[in-house]
Amino acid sequence: METLIAAEDLSVAYGGARVLQDVSLRIAPGEIVTIVGPNGSGKSTLVRALIGLTRPDGGKVMRAPGLRLGYVPQKLALDASLPLSVRRFLSLPRRVSDAAAEAALARTGVAGLSGRQIAGLSGGQLQRVMLARALLDRPQLLILDEPTTGLDQPATAAFYRLIEEVRGETGCSVLMVSHDLHVVMSASDRVICLNGHVCCEGTPRVISAAPEYRALFGLGTGGALALYRHAHDHGHEHDHGHGHDPAHPHEAHPVPLVPIAGGQGLSSQGSGAKGSGGQGSSAQASGGSVAGGKAGRAAAPEQGARCAECGGRHAV
Ligand SMILES: Nc1ncnc2c1ncn2[C@@H]1O[C@H](COP(=O)(O)OP(=O)(O)OP(=O)(O)O)[C@@H](O)[C@H]1O
């Protein structure tokens, strides 16, 4: 299977505190993958390590050569008192034409905001402007870190619909971090449940039923299943390791849960590399080939002690 980006046994520590341990994942062309997990479980750290903003102290990140990557950060690290128009923001760091800027704003539903100050935008408008900026480089992989923070429910649902439309139009893959479990379950092809390590991963249906997920998020996510009506009738090709016919309902061949094998405990070693502040940039990822193996170690037997946090058996 073709892979755009992959992490293999990725570990990150900040000043000796282990945040990620042996995290492996891979993103295939065209799929929408969502990372869920409790506060502080390392979701943003994982995203930043994938992008290259945070240096891992173990494992590696591999990208398809010349991968075009669009990134929408959780927060915009801008001084609100600095005058910065939407139009100028769209040309940071690379100048874009007025036509391209207008088209991107129109695509994300905020046409006509060009002359407005970034500091004066509502939360929903800012998210759409940041998405417009990320789309300007025609990313093959769009990475969004909690893109709907602070938005109300209709705005959140509308934003996820927009993401699905963009994926449908451009064929880009989407990797996002989200706490909106119900929407995540309806809008994702695959969900990765993170708590310093990958607790479990699979289709929304499989994840909703996973004991590891339920231990972390409780049993009140039944509505997420009700929302999940993914008939898998979109045109992209992807394979979650089970080679299904894309015309099949996705649930018919659920991805097996992927416990992380191995016996290493938490280490207090680590260099704690800090990344620089993300600014909603699009970045041309540096090259490097992607290994074809299944990064998530599918169908590995459960090993290790039962996790006190999520109830699953895994390395950490
Ligand atoms: N630059 C940093 N320096 C030191 N510690 C950090 C840094 N960034 C994150 N951390 C710590 O690492 C842990 C994981 O943080 P991270 O932001 O990755 O979690 P998260 O799952 O995205 O959380 P949330 O859901 O609250 O956004 C937290 O304990 C956090 O305090």
Image: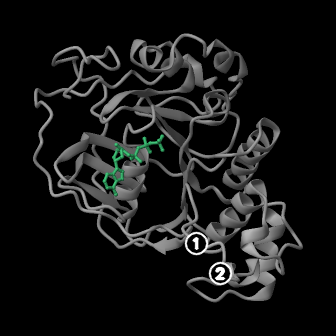
Horizontal relation, residue 138 to residue 5: left or right: right
Q: Position of residue 130 (x, y in %)?
A: 66, 65
Figure quadrant of residue 182:
top right
- Residue at 84%, 60% (x, y): give it: 109
Quadrant including the C terminus: top left
Give the CA separation, mark 1 to mark 2: 8 Å
Kindly identify the amino acid type of the residue bearing the numbered disc 1: Leu
* Number of numbered callouts drawn: 2
Q: Residues within 10 Å of mark 1 (few under 14, many from 20)?
A: few
Q: Compared with residue 145, is residue 84 higher up or lower down, i.e. above or below? A: below
Element under label 2? loop
Residue 253, visible in the rendered structure? no
Q: Ligand 1 closer than 8 Å to the CB at disc 2?
A: no
- Residue at 67%, 32% (x, y): give it: 183
Figure quadrant of residue 75:
bottom right
Location of mark 1 (residue)? 78
Kindly identify the amino acid type of the residue bearing the numbered disc 2: Leu
Horizontal relation, residue 99 to residue 265: left or right: right
Q: Identify the mark at residue 82; answer none if there is no mark.
A: 2
Q: Decide: marks 1, 2 in contact (CB < 8 A)?
A: yes
Horizontal relation, residue 97 to residue 273: left or right: right
Element under label 1? loop
Horizontal relation, residue 96 to residue 209: left or right: right
Q: Residues within 10 Å of mark 2 (few under 14, many from 20)?
A: few
Q: Position of residue 186 (x, y in %)?
A: 67, 30
- Residue at 25%, 47% (x, y): give it: 8
Q: Compared with residue 222, is residue 132 higher up or lower down, i.e. above or below? A: below
* Front-lying residue, 205 or 10: 10
